[in-house]
Amino acid sequence: MHFMQQTLQLRKVRDLGEKISDSFLFLKRNFKELLSTYFVFVVPFIILAVVVSIFFAGRLYSAVVSKAYDFQISDIFGFEFLVILLCLVMAYASYNTAIYSYFSLYDEQKGVKPTMQQVGQLYFKNVFRVLGYNIAVGFILILIAIIPYLIVMFIPLLGFLGQMLLSILFNAIMATMTNMYIKEGVGISGATSRLFDLFRDKWWHVIGFNLVNYLIYYVFAGVLVFIGIMIFMVASLNMTTNPFAENSVLTTGKISVYAIAIGVLFLIMQLFELIVLSGAAINYYSLCEEKDGTAIEEMIDAIGENTDKYGGVEEQY
């Protein structure tokens, strides 16, 4: 049974409540497409990381057993560790690039859902650029924030609030600039200038929205992850047995199970990040419309023209 519903316009001036509700509305109407995007462009990196983690954990366990108390920290760092790290970094960059590519195409096509092929073309055009820019910007932000962080971290309540504020700002800046790299095709310099233009007189609004956005994410993801962690901890009680004992119950098979369990928990947490990513994109396009007014200009220009792409019928699902 088909029912009619209006296309969700991304470029629209919204208050805080509208941003939250439209984030969930967009996620609801595009969930299958966003989920497919996640599985195609992100999950392969996580699977590879889990597989390598199994061999990595097995090698570490063998090193501990064979070297006993002569185990060296340097045994941790090797080819497997590098591959796992690269996979996780690529998973993060791929996630942001793929989802924000979907949003960019959705906006460009005036609400028509992009195909996976279209998302792929924009994704491969931007993924390594986004990765490089995010590493550079992240490093710069850490250098800027390190002194304020060190000042407040030892003050109980102020330290907690300060760390939370810095974390929210960091994520808001990174998400907004990533949208700019993909949608506006700018580099770090152009994105920085545009960022201050969008955030001017809006800093506390941005902080408040992102705080609510992350609280919603932690509420949704926290319950399932907590249950998973409890199950994992109960199943991991055998890990506390002495690995040097002859009757140790820790085996390579159990190490593999634990590595897979951690990978599944990571997948769940990343999947729920669709809430955060959708909210960040809605916030970005809302700020753009508030500053640029492009959607209003298009509506004025379209007066008297037939721009109905559905032939008089609203988009159907």
Image: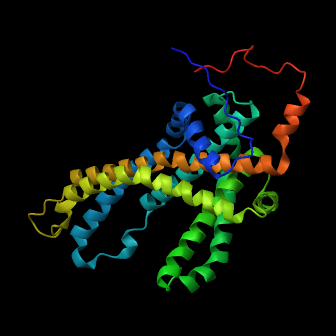
Residue at image point 44% right, 61% down? 81
Residue at image point 47% right, 45% down? 271
Asked if residue 69 is positioned above or below residue 295 in the image, the reply reads below
- Is residue 136 visible from the viewing direction of this image? no
Residue 299 is situated, as x and y percent measured from the top left of the image, at: 85, 32
Report the front residue among 207 and 96: 207
Report the front residue among 222 and 256: 222
What colour-coding does the image apply? rainbow
Report the front residue among 2 and 122: 2
Residue 57 is situated, as x and y percent measured from the top left of the image, at: 32, 59
Residue 162 is situated, as x and y percent measured from the top left of the image, at: 56, 76
- Is residue 43 visible from the viewing direction of this image? yes
Residue at image point 82% right, 51% down? 291
Q: Looking at the image, how many numbered discs can be counted on the residues? A: 0
Residue 133 is situated, as x and y percent measured from the top left of the image, at: 69, 58
Would you identify the image quadrant in which residue 66 lies? bottom left
Asked if residue 235 is positioned above or below residue 47 in the image, the reply reads below
Left or right relative to 250: residue 228? right
Residue at image point 65% right, 37% down? 102
Quadrant, the C terminus = top right
